Image: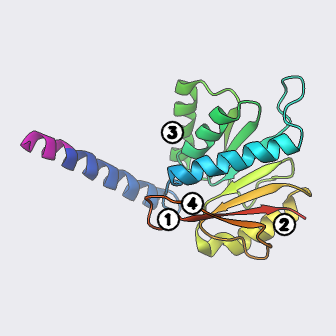
Amino acid sequence: MEIFKAVLFCVAAYLLLWNVYILIFNKGVPNIRTAPAIRRRIIDTLKSDMAKKGGAKNGAPRYTIYDMGSGNGLLTREIAKAIPDARVIGVEASRQCIEWSDKVKTAQNIPNLEYRRADFFEHDFGDADAVVVFLSVYEMGRVGEKLMKNLKSGTLVTSNRFPLTGWAVEEKVKVLTLYPFQKYFHIYHHP
C-alpha cells in the first residue's frame, strides 16, 4: 500500500510540475483539457454539421475543422479519429505543445490531422467549415471579433464554457461532466 501511495504521489507531482511548466512557457495560458463528455458532444455536433454540408466528395475531405489554441492536441486527435473524412487543424502558439502534438499524431498515425504553430489572432481561418474554441473568458471578445471578420458565412463555431462576445448563441448545450467548471458549450453559425 505504501508503494502505491508513493507512485501515486510521484505521478501527481509530475503532472503538477508539467502543468506549471506549460503555464510558464505557454504565454501564461494553462493547458486545460475539454471534459470527455463535452468532447463527445462537440464531435457529434461537428458530424451533424458536416453531414448537412455534404461531407466528403469522392473520398476527398471537403470539411475543414480548426481548433483555436489546440494545446496538447487531445481534442483535435479525437475529432480527427472520429471524423476521418474531415481535415482537422490545430493552431497553437506553444512550441512545446506543437512538438508533443506532432509526436502523438505520428505515433497514432492520424493522416487527416495537422498542427500549425501560430498566434491564432494572426492566423487565417477563411477556409474553415467549423472552429472549436476553449479559451479564457478574457479572450472571448477578441476571438469573437476575429472570427466575425475571418469566417465565411455558415461556418460552425463551438465554444466550450464561455460564450463568444458579440455573437448570438444558437444553442447553449448543458452537459453532465465531472469537471466542476465545464458544464456547457455554445453553438453558433457565422451569419
Q: Mark 1, mark 4: which one is toward the viewer?
A: 4
Q: Mark 2, mark 3: which one is toward the viewer?
A: 2
Number of residues whose C-alpha sits closer than 10 Å to that of mark 1, classed few (under 14), some (14–19) or many (20 or more) = few
Q: Which residue is mark 4?
A: 175
Number of residues whose C-alpha sits closer than 10 Å to that of mark 2, classed few (under 14), some (14–19) or many (20 or more) = some
Dot 1 lies on which element? loop
Q: Amino acid at mark 2?
A: Met
Q: Amino acid at mark 3?
A: Trp
Q: Which residue is mark 1?
A: 28
Any mark on residue 148, and which? 2
For the point 53% across and 31% down, which residue is it?
103
Among the two numbered marks 2 and 3 on one chain, the one whose residue lies closer to the N terminus: 3
Q: Which residue is mark 3?
A: 100
Q: Which of the 4 image quarters holds residue 62?
A: top right
For the point 81% across and 42% down, which residue is it?
50
Dot 3 lies on which element? helix
Dot 2 lies on which element? helix
**Residues at discs 4 and 3 in contact (Cβ within 8 Å):** no
